[in-house]
Image (cartoon, grey):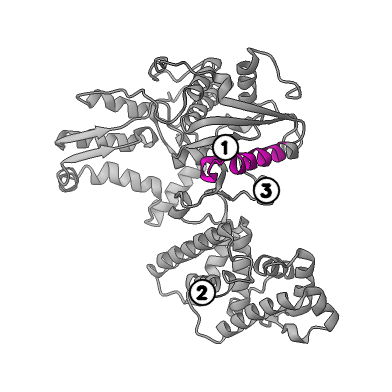
Amino acid sequence: MLARDDIQAVDVCLHNNLLDFSLQIQVFSRTLLANDWCRTQLFRSYDHLIADNLEEDTPVAHDLLKLWLPDLKSALLIYDAEAGYRVFLGADPDSAQQLQAVCTQAVALTTHYVSSDDVQALALALTRQLSTRPAPEPAPDPAPATPGVARAAFDVALRRFYPEMLDWTADTIAHLLHEDRVPAAEIAILAPFVSDSLRFSLMDRLAQRGVPARSHRPSRELRAEPATRCLLTLASLAHPGWQLPPLAADVAQAFYLALDGLDPVRAHLLSRIVYRAKAGEAPTLTSFDIIAGKAQERITYRLGQAYEQLRRWLLAYRVEEVQALDHFLSRLFGEVLSQPGFRFHGDFDAGRVAAQLIESARKFRWAVAGVGQTPLLDMGRDYLGLVESGLIGALFVAGWQENEDAVLIAPAYTFLMRNRAVQHQFWLDVGSSGWAERLDQPLTHPYVLSRRWSEDRIWTDADEVATKQQNLYRLLVGLLRRCRTRVHLGITQWGEQGFEQQGMLVQVLQRVLGQGEKPQGVGG
């Protein structure tokens, strides 16, 4: 039941003696585990086992646990009955639940320690509006001694246009932060997808109101980050041996992002005057001192001094021996761009991106060094080509850690994967269909390719709708169980792309608001 591209990938791996992830799993489960020596070394090395979040594991992992349990003195298997968010990565909650049959004792924990009674009541109200629930789920929790009120757990902002919703979001968060003294880290802004325009608009509005904010989008390409473009453009200027002179527009953007106080217009003027790139010659940056007086005054001498500091540092590096790209980027950030007078100074988001880029370049160097003697100059050029082709950075642990007192802006599923609770959640673009949509996967289908799917059964529209409803249910319950106090809903008639909003989530909320009454200004 593999797609044609999957079969071709397997053939390439077998023909060239390579292992991709799927083949690694097959070799481990079908070959290594079948070897008596390997089984002995693995199963008898440990006496006790704790396995958490089984619903996020694959059936192969569940098979391993079944084989392992008889050789253990004790084991604790933990399963979240209403999670299983990463189905698109092979997670199988139903397979995980079958492990209960091989356990000697099953304990169900139903007490909530995070959400208030009102938020729990809202979760129950949303659940009732969804016509189906996942079949194996346990019964709802018993009613608390003081029943909560679902309507008290959220407020709704109905706006006609998208920017109006963003203004409401920024104003409400500023009031929570400055008037109600809610810590910034206790506020999360969530949307089904966080586009570049949405992220920029929110960050800009929050900055104008004195609200610290950060974003986390782990699936975002490295090249999409402005800080990455700045660092790699400067790296190209410092490595003429790459023979990859950057475009004048990229140099102007690098000046704008590097020099604190420089606007795009003057950045373009500066690059047009000082940047020289001819075919067959190394790109050069001329001195600020030889610029005509009027142009100097327009750019300002303070910015000219910062530019000179950057230019001289790049020239000094050129005469040195070529270093590993991650070493170069680390030095560039630490010795120049993070210093006063440069825009990276005090910009925690740019610092995060720079750290991720440096770590990604370092791991690439380690990987390449293990298979041959590639010169550092060629290695840096090859890494630049990978980034330009759309490379996603290596796992960056620091990006998942709560180390800043700032409002978090993230996609809803990314917030769930962080498994952190906050006092206030802002759900934006509530009318979008993206809240219930499953990820588009042209090569694989997590449901049709699962063990539970019959080979002669056809995936229909009814299956798709039922899956969307189940995914929405899991998403909403997961978000509300990570909300302590209140949910703020931003609903607009017209979405970010200018289309009318009629997604499944807004329809469910309409029924919760008025048992079928439709809020004015929403939908058609």
Q: Earlier in the sequence, mark 2 or mark 3?
A: 3
Residue placed most toward the observer, 161 or 169? 169
Residue 466 higher or lower than 330, as above or below: above
Q: Callout 3, which amino acid? A: Arg
**Element under label 1?**
loop
Distance from disc 2 to disc 3, alpha carbons, whole Å, reads 34 Å
Q: Residues within 10 Å of mark 2 (few under 14, many from 20)?
A: few
In the displayed structure image, the side of residue 204 where residue 375 appears, left or right: left
- The Cα atoms of the two marked residues, 2 and 1, are separated by 40 Å
**Of 152 and 375, the residue lying toward us:** 152
Q: Please tell me whether residue 174 belongs to the stretch shown in magenta.
A: yes
Question: Residue 291 is drawn in which quadrant?
Answer: bottom right
**In the image, what residue type sits under mark 2?**
Arg
Q: Magenta span covers which residues?
A: 165-189
128 lies left or right of 170: left
x and y percentages locating residue 159 in the rendered image: 74, 31
